[in-house]
Image: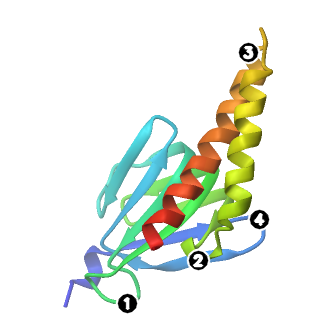
Amino acid sequence: MADETNQLRVRLVTPERTLFEHGASAVELPGKSGYMEVLFGHAPLLTELGAGDVTVHGGPDGPDSVSRYNVSWGFAEVLPDRVTVLASDALKPEEIDVDRAETQLVRGQKLWNEAGESEEAYTEALRVIAEAEAKLATAAEKQ
């Protein structure tokens, strides 16, 4: 059995609910510039999250278990012994509505095509597209 003293305390919350709160051996986070892995003893860090999966290794189902949660933006606070993820939205893979995510992707592509010279419109289109693509990728993994 893993040494409980070298466990991260991981908490994943949204404004509506707490999705995960348990010990883990590692957690992968979708940072704004790419994925990062956090292990026990990590240097303190506050980072902005993008759209993607928070992957928790060694959660409540045992040391070899892996839990995934799709998040859409937010922040993560990393301390040597704990990780707190504050996400705007987070879903378990089975909660993802694929049809809705596909509609969101089409909407994002439409926003992209209509953005014209507006940097803000392109940024919003990219946000919508990234969120939809991340949801579709998470849903595809569960099958």
Q: Position of residue 120 (x, y in %)?
A: 77, 21
- Checking the image for residue 79, the label placed there is none
| CB contact under 8 Å: marks 3 and 4 | no
Q: Position of residue 68 (x, y in %)?
A: 46, 69
* Mark 1 neighbour class, 10 Å CA radius: few under 14, some 14 to 19, many 20 or more: few
Task: Report helix, strand or loop for mark 4.
Answer: loop
Q: CA distance from mark 1 to mark 4?
A: 25 Å
**On the image, which quarter does residue 14 sit in?**
bottom right
Q: Identity of the amino acid at label 4?
A: Pro
Coordinates of residue 27 in the picture (x, y in percent): 38, 63
Kindly identify which residue carries mark 2: 94
C-alpha gap between disc 3 and disc 2? 35 Å
SS under mark 1: loop
Q: Which residue is mark 4?
A: 15
Residue occupying image coordinates x 19% and y 91%: 1
Q: Nearer the viewer, mark 3 or mark 2?
A: 2
Q: Nearer the viewer, residue 11 or 88?
A: 88
State which quarter of the image contains the C terminus.
bottom left
Residue 86 placement (x, y as % from top left): 63, 58
Whichever of labels 3 and 1 marks the residue nearer the N terminus, that label is 1
- Cα distance, mark 3 to mark 4? 29 Å
- What amino acid type should be assigned to the residue bearing mark 3? Glu
Give the mark nearest the N terminus, 3 or 2: 2
| Residue toward you, 21 or 111 | 111
- Report the residue marked by disc 1: 61
Q: Mark 1 against mark 2, which lies toward the viewer?
A: 2
Spatial distance from mark 3 to mark 1, Cα to Cα? 45 Å
Q: In screen coordinates, is 38 left or right of 135?
A: left
